[in-house]
């Protein structure tokens, strides 16, 4: 099982920016971020393969950027132009031979 340690998150005003980081304990093929708002299902935010192929939810395209450092086994999510609807717990995601999740970090965007 891969261990994932997240950092970043917090409270920001609408229009602001935050950066999330996640470090994995080993090499991972696909890393990314999902989020879950209160009363809603967990949803994809963005993923990136070890080769650099990215996938974004339509709701964050043009505002969020995912990147990774394969040498350090880390993935970052730069979130710009944040909206109140981005408020959620953000979970780091890793898929190698199985799917593993981070513990989650709260992102709150005030209007």
Image: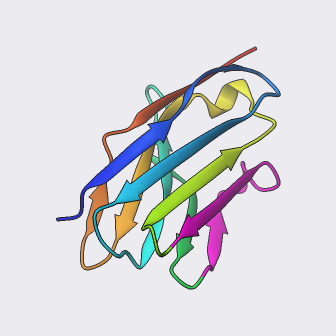
For the view shown, which residue lies furthest in the bottom direction? Answer: 51
For the view shown, which residue lies furthest in the top direction? Answer: 111
The quarter of the displayed image where residue 86 is located: top right
- State which quarter of the image contains the N terminus: bottom left
Q: Position of residue 84 (x, y in %)?
A: 70, 24
- State which quarter of the image contains the C terminus: top right
Residue 64 in view, yes or no: yes
Work out whether residue 77 or residue 63 is closer to the camera in this orientation and state it. Answer: 77
Residue 41 in view, yes or no: no
Please tell me whether residue 66 belongs to the stretch shown in magenta: yes
The quarter of the displayed image where residue 56 is located: bottom right
- 104 left or right of 90 in image: left
- 101 left or right of 84 in image: left
- 29 left or right of 10 in image: left
Residue at 41% x, 79% y is 29
Instruction: Please state the total of marks drawn on the protein image.
Output: 0
Work out whether residue 44 or residue 62 is closer to the camera in this orientation and state it. Answer: 62
Where 57 sits versus 36, above or below?
Answer: below
Residue at 49% x, 31% y is 37
Residue at 82% x, 54% y is 62
The magenta region covers 52-69
């Amino acid at each position: 099982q891969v261990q994932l340690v997240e950092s970043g998150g917090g409270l920001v005003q609408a229009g602001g920016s935050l950066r999330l980081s996640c470090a994995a304990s080993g090499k991972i093929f696909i890393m990314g971020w999902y989020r879950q708002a209160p009363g809603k299902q967990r949803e994809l935010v963005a993923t990136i393969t070890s080769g650099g192929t990215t996938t974004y939810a339509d709701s964050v395209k043009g505002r969020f950027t995912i990147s990774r450092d394969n040498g350090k086994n880390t993935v970052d999510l730069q979130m710009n132009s944040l909206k109140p609807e981005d408020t959620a717990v953000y979970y780091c995601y890793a898929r190698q031979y199985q799917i593993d999740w981070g513990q989650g970090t709260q992102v709150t965007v005030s209007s």
